[in-house]
Amino acid sequence: MSLFAAKRRSGAIRFEDLTLGYDRHPAVHHLDGEIAAGSLTAVVGPNGAGKSTLLKAIAGALSPLDGRIRIGTGEKPRIAYLPQAADIDRAFPIAVYDLVAMGLWGRSGLFGGIGRKQQAAIGEAIAAVGLTGFERRAIGTLSGGQMQRALFARLLLQDAAIILLDEPFTAIDARTTADLLDLVRRWHAEERTVVAVLHDMEVVRRVFPETLLIAREPIAWGETASVLTPENLLEARRMIEAFDPHAAVCEKAAA
Ligand SMILES: Nc1ncnc2c1ncn2[C@@H]1O[C@H](COP(=O)(O)OP(=O)(O)OP(=O)(O)O)[C@@H](O)[C@H]1O
């Protein structure tokens, strides 16, 4: 697709003593390090570990309480963000075609109009997720798996150097998960930076070369096999159980 021309390998994400939170209550503490441009990284950890918070911050939807996030070098690369299914309004009266077409807004503008080339790209994206024939269906009538396919088609059109996926396969059937994982592999082969919050360790081990394990603070980060050890997973659980959710200040910063 000629429309797909995002600058590849431009999507490095660097964390510098990053602290994130809500109403001054920290949810993620002291994260330092870099997600390399073109890498494929899983973010895992117990419930409440701060995984979604981290993705929101990378997407620019949440400002750091402390530290910073540096994205790319020079011109900021395009970021595509798929929130958790629970955060997406399925009651919005919109057809599959129009939902997918929204992926072009970043480049055409809201009222930029859709030409023949764009129409072909939308059709190709819908075909790539197996939804040809569903173009005029209202999204409220789709199954969970079909909705996720439509959202992945929109991501395809966004043509972003950085793609953020928050629990993309939760409550999604095996066939759809396998098809959408093929798209994730394709994005990785295209040297886009892909970061996904996941709970299925089997999928992480099989598909994601890099893993960040967090439990409010980073427990381990690097090659997946060396991160997902029983010791690290136990440590992550212990950290979350010991965490005081009402802590107002960061202990490390205050020390
Ligand atoms: N909008 C918000 N306002 C206040 N606190 C929030 C908000 N969103 C998340 N939190 C809190 O921040 C902490 C981290 O939440 P987050 O959703 O990032 O965790 P998670 O690792 O994605 O969890 P899960 O696996 O359950 O989705 C939790 O204690 C949560 O209650």
Image: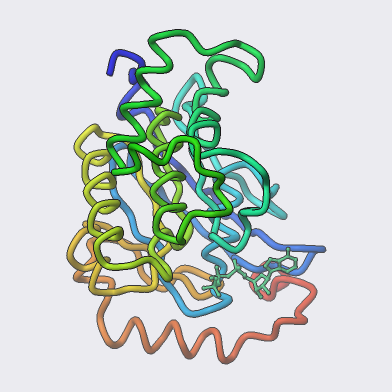
Tell me which residue sits at (30%, 87%) in the image: 231
Residue 110 percent location from the top left of the image: 65, 20
Q: Nearer the viewer, residue 248 or 129?
A: 129
Residue 148 percent location from the top left of the image: 43, 53
Q: Nearer the viewer, residue 255 or 108?
A: 108
Residue 159: image quadrant is: top left
Residue 160: image quadrant is: top left
Q: Nearer the viewer, residue 227 or 177?
A: 177
Q: Name the colouring of the figure.
A: rainbow
Image vertical order of residue 206 relative to residue 124, above or below:
below
Please state, as top left, top right, bottom left or bottom right, where the C terminus lies in the image. Answer: bottom right
Image vertical order of residue 173 relative to residue 54, above or below:
below
In the visual, does 229 lie left or right of 59? left
In the visual, does 63 lie left or right of 144? right
Tell me which residue sits at (42%, 71%) in the image: 171
In the visual, does 166 lie left or right of 17? left
Image vertical order of residue 126 relative to residue 73, above or below:
below
In the image, ligand 1 is in what quadrant? Answer: bottom right
Tell me which residue sits at (27%, 66%) in the image: 204
